[in-house]
Image (spheres, rainbow, N blue to C red):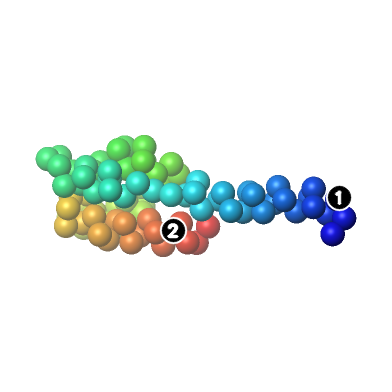
Amino acid sequence: MSRLAIALVLPLLAALSAAPAAWAVNFASLSAQASSPGGLTFERARAGIPGLLRPTFDAADRNGDGVIDAREFPTFQSLVNARIRMR
């Protein structure tokens, strides 16, 4: 492989390998918030998941109270993971 090809390919490989880390979500922290009094609000969830859209949050908020509680959190986590895989 020529030096030019290596110079072009290596940054691309580095970017591709780093991409999933940029999408990593700290679900442990969000789960703790969901289990706490007051639950996980959209604002707190969005702080932990930049780019989170309101429809994804609302789809997991089964009782429509504006917060994700411990019972709703597994659905929320599944929906977020599905959106990440779609990227």
Residue with the mark numbered 2: 83
Image marks 2 and 1: residues in contact by CB distance under 8 Å: no
Q: As rendered, which of 40 and 53 lies closer to the eye?
A: 40
Three-letter code for the amino acid on which mark 1 is drawn: Leu
- Decide: few, some or many residues near mark 1? Use Cα within 10 Å; few <14, some 14-19, many ≥20: few
Which mark sits nearer the N-terminus, 2 or 1? 1
Q: Which residue type does callout 2 highlight?
A: Arg
Q: Residues within 10 Å of mark 2 (few under 14, many from 20)?
A: few
In the rendered view, does 67 fall on the left or right side of 56? left
Q: Position of residue 86 (x, y in %)?
A: 50, 61
User: Residue drawn 56% across and 50% down?
Assistant: 19
The reply to whether residue 66 is in sight is no
Residue pointed to by mark 1: 4
Task: Count how many numbered circles sit on residues in the image.
Answer: 2
The vertical placement of 16 against 39, above or below, is below
**For residue 73, which numbered disc appears in the image?**
none
Q: Secondary structure at mark 1?
A: helix
Q: Which residue corresponds to the image point at 16% horizontal and 47% vertical from the top-left?
A: 35
* Image quadrant containing the N terminus: bottom right
> Which label lies toward us, 2 or 1?
1
- Residue located 38% across and 56% down the image: 80
